[in-house]
Image: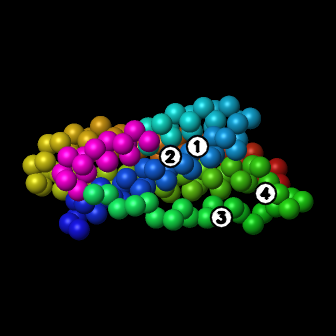
Amino acid sequence: MNGVTHTLNALHHGEKRLADRLTTTAERHSAEHEVHHVATDLARWSREHAQRLAQAAQDRDTELMPDPDPDTDDLPAWTTDGHPEPGLLLLHELRELHLAATENSLLWEMLAQVAQATSDDELLTLASSCHPQTLRQMRWTNTMIKTLSPQILSSL
């Protein structure tokens, strides 16, 4: 497996994982309207990215590796009556989403750099159109953490 194939695989898995996590967060926190609606929209972006990456791999006669077994969703240990405190759970999920989007952002940057170095205009166009949306995902999670942390953490 060459470096481009490795990066396509890592990004494909990362975008699918991020879409799943965003969808789960949107469903779990449906009462938080901004979280629900924005996370749903951001998940759509990641699903589209995964589809475009699969197409790019197919165009290169590259077979993507099967998805690894899904990580168990390690929920925070903080509980009230055996259930995670909703605010702390939301902060935990936002942190995990931010880290996943950051990982994808780094992979998009790596793909863009190799595309530039090898004059692969198709891959460069793909990275250039998808990476800004990943950066937006990172900014949203960071903003939500900044906004919600003071209220949630000081009310415990």
Under circle 1, the secondary element is helix
Q: Quadrant of the C terminus?
A: bottom right
Identified by mark 3, the residue type is: Asp
In magenta segment, residue 14: no
Pick whichever of labels 4 and 2 is earlier in the sequence: 2
The residue mark sitting in front, 4 or 2, is 2
Check disc 1 and give the amino acid type: Thr
Residue 120: image location, x then y, percent: 13, 48
Residue holding disc 2: 19
Residue at the spot of label 1: 23
How far, Cα to Cα, is label 4 from label 2? Answer: 22 Å
23 displayed left or right of 8: right
Q: Dot 4 corresponds to which residue?
A: 84
The disc labelled 2 sits on which kind of residue? Ala
> Which SS class for mark 3?
loop
Extreme residue toward the left, this view: 119
Disc 3 vs disc 4: Cβ atoms closer than 8 Å? no
Could you give the CA–CA distance between mark 3 and mark 1, rounded to whole angstroms?
16 Å
The CA span between labels 1 and 4 is 19 Å
Q: Which residue is at a point 78% across and 57% down the rendered structure image?
A: 84
Label the magenta part by its dominant secondary structure. Answer: helix
Residue 29 visible in the shown view: yes
**Measured from the top left, where is residue 5 in percent x and y?**
25, 60
Left or right relative to 62: residue 78: right
**Number of callouts:** 4
- Measure how far apart labels 1 and 2 are at the Cα level: 6 Å
Magenta span: 47-62
Q: Nearer the viewer, residue 32 or 153?
A: 32
